[in-house]
Image (cartoon, rainbow, N blue to C red):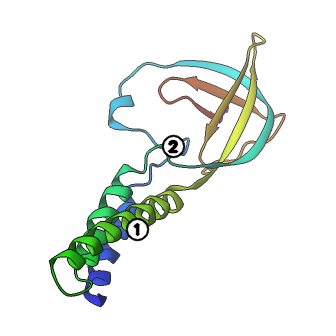
């Protein structure tokens, strides 16, 4: 059973590395060289929020496989190995889902801004930059949208 823990550690590290970066300075390849609208605005309010994963399929799948393999070593005889594999897979799926969910959670800020033409928007992004209420900023309206300091 201990040798399975040796295999689980790299899987958990790999899951942690998969956490998306959500800061205002983080761009995906697909959003590079794409035109976005930019609107001068003012921050009306800022609040801290928790950002969690929408999809824990990888953790559920990896946990199920690892649990099934580990559970299949329980007992003596074909039926006990089968029941152990089924129970281990179910427990592994639950554990994998919970582990990935906890590893993917990040802090963020929700900004409510008012553009100079009077429209109000809300954008949530990572904690790499903190803007304050009353501060001038720029709303970059794209995919994803972001709020940046206006200099």
Decide: is 74 above or below 99.
Answer: below
The residue at the point 60 percent across, 51 percent down is 128
Query: In the image, residue 63 lies at what x, y percent?
Result: 34, 65
Q: Decide if residue 71 is on the left or right side of residue 16.
A: left
Query: In the image, residue 123 lies at what x, y percent?
Result: 65, 32
When asked about the image quadrant of residue 69, the answer is: bottom left
- Which of labels 1 and 2 is toward the front? 1
| SS under mark 1 | helix
Numbered label tally: 2
- Which residue is at the far top? 117
Q: Decide if residue 117 is on the left or right side of residue 7.
A: right
In this view of the protein, which residue sits in the foreground, 87 or 79? 79
Determine crowd level at label 2: few under 14, some 14-19, many 20+ residues with C-alpha closer than 10 A.
few
The residue at the point 29 percent across, 87 percent down is 1
What residue does disc 1 label? 91
Query: In the image, residue 15 lies at what x, y percent?
Result: 37, 61
What residue does disc 2 label? 25
Decide: is 49 above or below 30.
Answer: below
In this view of the protein, which residue sits in the foreground, 66 or 91? 91
Image quarter of the C terminus: top right
Determine crowd level at label 1: few under 14, some 14-19, many 20+ residues with C-alpha closer than 10 A.
some
Q: Decide if residue 124 is on the left or right side of residue 66.
A: right
When asked about the image quadrant of residue 134, the answer is: top right
In this view of the protein, which residue sits in the foreground, 93 or 148? 93
Query: In the image, residue 138 lies at what x, y percent?
Result: 65, 27
Which sits earlier in the primary sequence, circle 1 or circle 2? 2
Residue 107 tag number: none
């Amino acid at each position: 059973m201990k040798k399975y823990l040796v295999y689980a550690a790299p899987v958990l590290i790999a899951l942690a590395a998969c956490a998306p970066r959500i800061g205002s300075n983080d761009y995906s390849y697909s959003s590079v060289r794409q035109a976005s609208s930019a609107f001068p605005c003012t921050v009306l309010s800022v609040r801290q929020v928790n950002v969690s994963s929408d999809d824990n399929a990888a953790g559920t799948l990896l946990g199920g496989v690892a649990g099934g393999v580990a559970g299949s070593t329980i007992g003596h005889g074909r039926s006990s190995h089968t029941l152990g594999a089924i129970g281990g897979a179910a427990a592994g799926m639950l554990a994998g889902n919970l582990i990935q969910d906890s590893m993917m959670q990040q802090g963020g800020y929700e900004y409510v801004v008012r553009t100079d033409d009077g429209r109000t928007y809300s954008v949530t992004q990572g904690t790499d930059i903190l803007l304050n209420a009353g501060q001038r900023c720029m709303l970059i309206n794209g995919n994803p949208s972001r709020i940046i300091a206006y200099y």
